[in-house]
Image: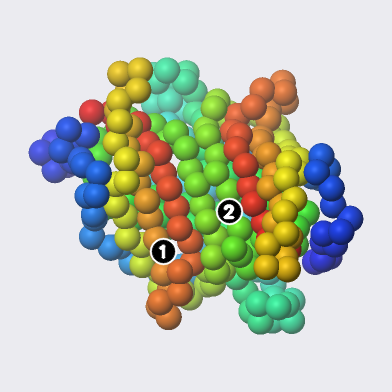
Amino acid sequence: MAKLDPAQVEVGLELPPVSKFITQEKINKYAEASGDFNPLHIDPEFAKTTMYKGTIAHGLMSVAFLSEMMSRWAGSVWMAGPSQMEVTFLAPVRPGDTVTAKGKVTDKSIEDGKVRFTCEIWCENQEGQKVIAGKSQVVV
Amino acid sequence: MSEEKYLLWDDAYVGMEFPSVTYELTQETVSKYAEAVEDDDSLYRDKAMAAQSEFGGLIAPPTIAAIFVLDAINRSAKRAPGGVHAKQEFEFLAPARPGDILTTTAKIIDKYLKKERRYTIFETETRNARGELVVRGKMTTIWAR
C-alpha cells in the first residue's frame, strides 16, 4: 500500500472515488456476514409492504465504502488509527443502484509533529443523490 | 418475544449502562464481510502479504466494528422492531484482528424528542482481550416506541 505524503496534500483535494454496484445477492452476503437479517434488507415480499416498497441495503454497507475510500487514499494509517468517521444516513440504497463514495480534504493541521486531515465524505447514487454524508479524520 | 421484554424509550435514561457483550471475530466473518463490501485489500484476506505488513498479520476492515457494535447494542438494549439508525460515528484506535475476543459496553449519553421522533445516542467502547481500546462508537437511533 502506497504511503501518503502529507506535504503533497492541500485543502480542497478531492479523494479518489470508490464505486460499487449493489445487488440483492451482495445485500444477502452482508446480512450473512453481519448477522443482520432484518427482512427489510433480504425479503422482497416483506419489503414491498413497507414504506420503502422494496428491499434496501444495510446503511452500514455504505459506511464500508467510505472507509475503503479512506484506506485507499490515506493508506494503513487509516486502519492503524487513531482515525474517525461520522455519518448521517440520508436516503435508502436499493438493488440496482450504483453507489459512489466521494470526499474532499477540508482541513489540514499539525499535531504533535503529525498531520491531521479532516475530510468531507459522502456516498451518492447514480442520480447524484447523497445517501449518506459526514466527515472523517485521519492522522498521517 | 413477549412485548414486555423490550426496553421502551420512556424507560431509557441518560447514563443508563448495559451489560457488556462479547464477540469472537473469526477469519470467516472477516472474509465474508470483505467479500460483501468488495474490499479486496490483502490485509484482510492474504495471510502471507499481511504478515509482511506493518501489522505483522491479518487485520479486519475498520468498519467491521459495525457488526459487533450493533450486535452488542441490539442484544443488551433490546428495542421494539421498526427503529431507524440515523447517525453513526466510529473512532478507530487499534485494528481488530481475526481471532480477537471483543467486548463491547454501551450506555445512553443523550435522549431527546425532535419532530415528535424519539431519539437516543448510545456510546460504545470495544476492547480486545488484551484490554486495548479498539473502537469507540456513537449511534444515534430513532425508536419505534
Q: Nearer the viewer, residue B20 or A94?
A: B20
Q: Nearer the viewer, residue A13 or B49?
A: A13
The secondary element bearing badge 1 is classed as strand
Q: Which residue is mark 1?
A: B126
Q: Around disc 1, counting alpha carbons within 10 Å, would you say few (fewer than 14), some (14 to 19), or many (20 or more)?
A: many
Badge 2 amino acid: Gln
- Image spot of residue B26 (x, y percent): 48, 69
Number of numbered discs visible in the structure rendering:
2
- Image spot of residue B44 (x, y percent): 64, 66
Residue at horizontal 82%, vertical 66%?
Answer: A3
Residue at horizontal 32%, vertical 40%?
Answer: B110
Q: For residue A138, which quarter of the picture?
A: bottom right
Residue at horizontal 41%, vertical 69%?
Answer: B127
Q: Write down the chain letter for disc 1.
A: B
Q: Nearer the viewer, residue B126 or A112?
A: A112
The secondary element bearing badge 2 is classed as strand
Q: Is residue A131 above or below residue A31?
A: above
- The span from disc 1 to disc 2 (Cα, nearest Å) is 15 Å
- Image spot of residue B32 (x, y percent): 56, 58
Horizontally, residue B140 falls left or right of residue B6, namely: right
The quarter of the picture where the N terminus of chain B appears is top left
Residue B60 visible (yes or no)? no
